Image (cartoon, rainbow, N blue to C red):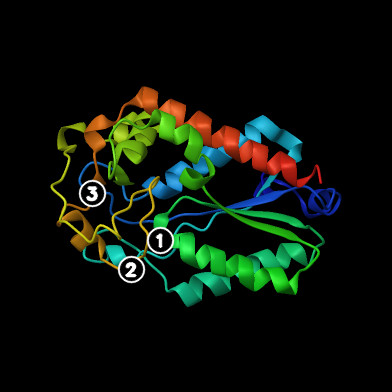
Amino acid sequence: MNWVDLTSPEISALPRDVPLVMNISAVEQHGAHLPVGTDAMIGAHVLDRLDAALDKRVLILPGVSVCCSAHHMDFGGTLSVSHATLAAYVSDIIDSVLRQGFRNIVLFNSHGGNQAIGQVIVEMLGPRWPGAQIVLATWWTLAHEALMRITQSGAGGVGHACEFETSLIQHMSPKQVRGALIADPELPQTYEWAAADMLRGGRASLYRSMKAQSGGSGVVGRPSFASADKGARISDAVLDALTHLIVSLTEN
């Protein structure tokens, strides 16, 4: 079910334990070969599939597409808001559904720059609503085990506009991939303790702009390893993991 497709009486009649899911994503550069809406497209794709799979057992909230992308502002096409703005906006929306009695909330994140502030939002809301279950789920973390079996690009291969994101857009919307412009960048070296990608975390966190991380290309990882078939497998893995999470919320 989609929140915006229902009437007010229909929403009021829903069981209060139905899980509500909101995508938080980004509108930002994804190199020369992917559209700036990549993160939002991926989030919407997964939630459309979730809605089809679970039907009346899940309620999809309107997503928030322009989020925290200040580290991409060296590149054209990027839109961003501050952490304070995003936290206030998202928490106000979630407050409004919690005030209506809903108690199972999932922030489904499809942008790396939202991970830290997403956790802050959860920790802001939790003490105010002790009877609610409020979850942050980032797709590549949620499906980590399955994704480790899919990736072929090695350490550092999945970062931004990479093997995974390129594969997903090739699967979802192949005409929006500028295939002739796919290239694996030469990445600047960083401290070994800070080296990380989507699947392999560093031991400590070091701020670097996307321009610095990518050597100016806007790409971090190895998109040459992408394929539409791999994108379908990634999509299935994320859907399976998210479905399990959603169903589990109403089983306790």
Q: Earlier in the sequence, mark 3 or mark 2?
A: 2
| Tag 3 residue | 219
Q: Using the image as rendered, state which of residue 152 and residue 109 is in the foreground.
A: 152
Q: Residue at x 56, y 34 (%)?
A: 239
Callout 1: SS: helix
Q: Which residue is mark 1?
A: 113
Name which residue lies at 76% across and 50% down: 7
Q: Position of residue 24 (x, y in %)?
A: 51, 56
| 22 relative position to 14: left or right | left
The reply to whether discs 2 and 1 touch (Cβ–Cβ < 8 Å) is yes
Label 3 sits on a secondary structure element that is loop
Q: Examine the image and state in which quarter residue 154 appears.
A: top left
- Determine the residue positioned at 69% across, 68% down: 126
N-terminal of the pair, mark 1 or mark 3, is 1
Q: Amino acid at mark 1?
A: Gly
How far apart, in angstroms, are the residues tagged by discs 1 and 3? 15 Å
Find the distance from the CA under tag 3 to the CA under tag 2.
Answer: 16 Å
Check disc 2 and report the residue beneath it. Answer: 70
Which residue is farthest top? 229
Residue 165 image offset from top left, x and y in percent? 35, 40
Q: Is residue 98 left or right of residue 24?
A: right
Q: Earlier in the sequence, mark 2 or mark 1?
A: 2
Confirm whether residue 237 shows in the render: yes
Q: Position of residue 135 (x, y in %)?
A: 64, 56
- Is 182 situated left or right of 133 in this image? left
Between 158 and 76, the residue placed more toward the observer is 158
